[in-house]
Amino acid sequence: MISVESLTKAYNGDAVVDAVTLQLPGSGLTTIVGPNGAGKSTLLSLISRILGPDAGTVIADDIDVLSAPGTEVAKKLSILRQDQNTTARITVRELVEFGRYPYSKGRLTEACHIAVEEAISYCDLVSLEERPIHEMSGGQRQRAYLAMVLAQDTRYVLLDEPLNNLDMVHATGMMRLLRSLADDQGKSIVLVLHDINYASVYSDRIVGMRDGEVVQDGPTSEVITPDALQAVFGTAFPVHDLAGNKFADYFR
Amino acid sequence: MATVVLWAAVAAVVTLSVASMFVGVIDIDFGAVLTDPEARRVFALSRIPRTLALILAGTAMAVAGLILQSLMRNRFVAPTTAGTVDAAAVGLLVVIIISPGAPVMGKVMVALVFALVGTILFLAVVRRTRFREAILVPLIGLVLGGVYRAVAEFLAYRYNLVQSIDTWFNADFSGIIAGRYETLWLAGAAAAAAYVFANRLTAVGMGEAFATSIGVNYRATMAVGMGIAAFATAVVVVTVGAIPFLGLIVPNIVTILVGDSLRKVLPITALAGAVLVLGCDIAGRIVIFPYEIPVGTIVGTVGAGIFLFLVMRKGNRYAAA
């Protein structure tokens, strides 16, 4: 479990993340949703110590994320952000090998090679492993970064808007991959999503943010309701049951 | 690909080194080295030191450029476009004015401090500007370097040292004999040390968030990389003078061929830097034989041409940047 306690980040006096206290489970798929500017991505960056907070603590299992050595944290949680480097001319395999840095500091061990192979084949990149990432399509590159995060072999995998720039087919493929990671490998996947229906279909738990605060936090069935969504987004939309899933009809 | 390029570069360094040792005013052939003691003396005193100096200086400047390009995530940054060379020259001038008899290592250390401060200032200015277009970053460096250089020229003018500073910006190996190049080994060692940090430097080149997420200490790696680049530059400036364009074009050509992973790129860049400097120095010795054109002038001319080709070639990666 990741325990977030009074986490705060302000810019020029405006709190983007305002004293957030939150518990993220040690398994399953948790999605953070909310309108633009709610502080979702900032919260994810703070939890993954990519951004330093003004106040608060983050404890992942037994590790104090904000003060433990970088490589120790990197064995516990990994983060995939939306602003990846897309111009670097390194191959998929070289990228994935970076995921092993916390374990090997660059001198790959036998276990590292196995983890790299597994991550590459899990993300269906075997035929592309010698391709430089700057020559790949957005969906392929996203998978390559995900493979790197898998090679890092952390219990917690944090993803900031992993569906950005993906078409429906690739977005669904990505969500299925993430779901199977949670189910098959027992990882805890925490992601920020824009589309609440993807969140509804794939998540075990949904966290709703608004104005830097957590306003909803519960099992998917309790958050995808007209009232709860109204609290998060400030507008009411009807919710329909369809083939066992709940869909918010926000199109009209 | 990388292996082929690596061995091609090794072969080129060996070939050009041999050529470099047999080109000069005194005609020496291979037999003479074995039999003639006078020829052997020329060899030990002048030809071998000069060849080694060329290899070490070329390696150091090329690697310094590669490191700066990776750290700054900009392919136009190099010791000559980040103010590093100009700042080192100011430092060297300050030592010469304050303590003319300072030992070479003292000069190197002061030049290093100035080079570091100058480069860090460049970094700070770039971070504070809103312009992030690739081409504006080196322009900021050139402007800043121009300011440092103006300081250097003003000081040089006041202290009657104008003639010496010209040679610091434009390398000349004609005066290299045994006993006057050995500090360059330190620059070579710095370039070799960079290899130890190759993975971390590549990670930092992927961005701060990327580096942090895999547990690489961003600030520490940045500091180490900057230190290595500034040290290599300072040693070269103090010993033989900066080689223009080298740190800019060599890393660009090599990364086009083998990618951005420093593990692969760094050794090839080091060798390719040596190849270019050796080749240009040999050309400089032949063109107006028995006189010489400084290697800096030749590299500058050839380098400008290569650089224009890189920028203007069809479908190049700079067009979109």
Image (cartoon, rainbow, N blue to C red):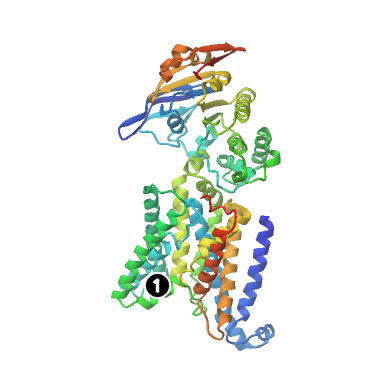
**Apparent side of residue B82 relative to residue B51 in the rendered image (left or right):** left
In this view, which residue lies farthest toward the front? A252
- When asked about the image quadrant of residue B237, the answer is bottom left
Q: Where is residue A233 in the image (x, y as percent from the top left)?
A: 43, 20
Q: Name the residue under label 1.
A: B103
In this view, which residue lies farthest toward the right? A127
Q: Which residue is found at the position 48% from the left and 63% from the top?
A: B232
Q: Position of residue B179 (x, y in %)?
A: 49, 77
Chain assignment, label 1? B
- Position above or below: B225 against B278: above
**Apparent side of residue B194 relative to residue B39 in the rendered image (left or right):** left
- When asked about the image quadrant of residue B17, the answer is bottom right
Q: Can residue A26 be spotted in the picture?
A: no
Q: Nearer the viewer, residue B50 or A11?
A: A11
Q: Can residue B247 be spotted in the picture?
A: yes
**Apparent side of residue A172 relative to residue B103 in the rendered image (left or right):** right
In this view, which residue lies farthest toward the left? B158
Q: Nearer the viewer, residue B316 or B86?
A: B316
Secondary structure under tag 1 reads: loop
Q: Where is residue A197 in the image (x, y as percent from the top left)?
A: 54, 20
Mark 1 surroundings within 10 Å by alpha-carbon count, few (fewer than 14), some (14 through 19), many (20 or more) = few
Q: Where is residue B46 in the image (x, y as percent from the top left)?
A: 55, 80
- Quarter of the image with the N terminus of chain B in it: bottom right
Q: Nearer the viewer, residue A169 or B245?
A: A169
Q: Which residue is found at the position 58% from the left and 77% from the top?
A: B283
- Position above or below: B65 against A191: below
- Identity, as a three-letter code, of the amino acid under mark 1: Pro
Total numbered circles: 1
